[in-house]
Image: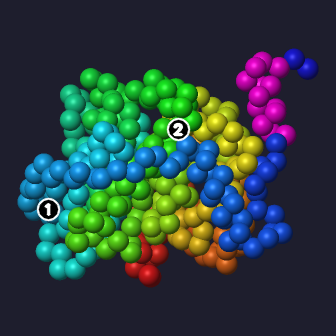
Amino acid sequence: MAYTPHEYNLALINKIKPSLRYEGTEPFTAWQKRALNQLTELLGLPLTQCGDNLKIEYETEHEAFTEIRFNFQSEPDYYVPCHLLIPSGASKPLPVVICLQGHSKGMHKSLGRAKYPDEIIDGDRDFAVRAVKEGYCALAIEQRCFGECGGMEDGSTDCHKSSMAALLIGRTVIGERVWDVQRAIDVLEKHFPQVDNQKIICMGNSGGGTTTFFAACIEPRISFAMPSCYFCTFDDSIAAIYHCVCNFVPNIRKFFDMGDLAGLIAPRPLVIVAGKDDDIFPIEGVKKAFSTAQSQYAAANAADNIKLVIGNGGHRFYADDAWRVMNTFIQGV
C-alpha cells in the first residue's frame, strides 16, 4: 500500500504506545513525578526567572467591578499585559479565574469589548465578564502571538515565526504561554490581596484551552482547570487535522497521549468542555481521551473530580453548561 507522507506519519503514530502511560506498576505519585519531569523538558521549561517589575497602568470603577490594567515582566525584557476585574463590594478575597482567549484578536474579548471594525464577540467568549457574574475575580492575560503580544496590525494572530524560532532553541510557544500563566500567579500572590490564591481557576477555549490544560499539568497552584475545545487524542486532532504550529510539542506523542497527561492534574478538579460538532477536535477523539483521563483520576482516588461537558454545537465555549459543573467543585472546597 502506498502512503502519502502525512498518512505514513499517522500510521507510525497509531502504532506507538505512549511510553510514559501509567500502568499501575508503581505508586501513582511516583508516576506523576516522572511524567512531570518529562513534560517540563518537552515544553522547554523552566524559562529564566526575573523580577516582575509590575506596572499598574490604570484603575477604573465600573458598575459591577473594579478594573486594574497592568503589565509585568515574565522573563527578562518580555512583558505581559493583563486586566484584573474585582467584583464590586467584595469584602474578602475571592477566587480568581485566569481567562485565556484562543486564536483571536486578543484578550479584550474576555472583557466583552470589541476592538476592531465589525468584530463580534460570540460563543460565550466574554470569559472575564462571566467570571465576575459568577462571583469571582477575573484575570485576562494576553497570550503570546495574539493581540497586543505579537498579533498582526489587523488583529489576526501571528504564531508561525515565533513558534519556529522557539523550536530552534529548545523552546515551545505552549511552554512560553504556560510560563506567563505561572508568573501571573506569582504576581497575584505578591501584589493583589483581593484574590484568594487557594482558589485559582484557569480556563480558556481552543488555544486558550491548550494553555489551560498544560498550565494545569505543570502548575499545582491552579486549583481548578476548565479547558474548552482542545482536549482530544493527539491522533484524532493535532496529528490528523490542520492546526496552527503553536499547537505542536516535539516528541510528546512518544511519551503521552492527551488523556495520559490529565493524570498530572489529578486529583484537582478538571472540567473538560467540548462541542459535539467541533470539526477540529472531533467528539469521538474527545471521548477516547476522556476515558483515558478517567482511568488516571481513578488511579489518583479522585474519580469524581473529572467531568466532561458536551455542548450542543461546534468550536466554542458553553458557559451555562460549564459553569454549572465547575461551581459545584469551587463551592464544595
Residue 142 shows in this picture: no
Residue sitting farthest toward the right: 1
- Residue 66 is tagged as 1
Residue 14: within the magenta? yes
Marks 1 and 2: in contact by CB < 8 Å? no
- Relative to 71, is 244 above or below? above
Residue 91 image-quadrant placement = bottom left
Mark 2: amino acid: Thr
- Relative to 157, is 299 above or below? below
Mark 1: amino acid: Thr
User: Residue shown at 83%/20% (left/top)?
Assistant: 3
Q: Earlier in the sequence, mark 2 or mark 1?
A: 1
Q: From the viewer's perspective, tell me whether residue 56 is left or right of residue 330.
A: left
Residue 304's spot in the image, x, y percent? 61, 76
Q: Residues within 10 Å of mark 1 (few under 14, many from 20)?
A: some
Residue 88's spot in the image, x, y percent? 14, 69
Q: From the viewer's perspective, tell me whether residue 248 is left or right of residue 186.
A: right
Residue 109's spot in the image, x, y percent? 28, 44
What is the image's colouring?
A: rainbow
Q: Which residue is under mark 2?
A: 172
- Camera-nearest residue between 134 and 44: 44
Where does the magenta region start and end? Answer: 3-15
Provide the secondary structure element on which disc 2 rests.
loop
Residue 53 shows in this picture: yes
Query: Foreground mark, 2 or 1?
Result: 2
Q: Main secondary structure of the magenta part?
A: helix
User: Residue shown at 79%/70% (left/top)?
Assistant: 26
Q: Which quarter shows the C terminus?
A: bottom left
Provide the secondary structure element on which disc 1 rests.
strand
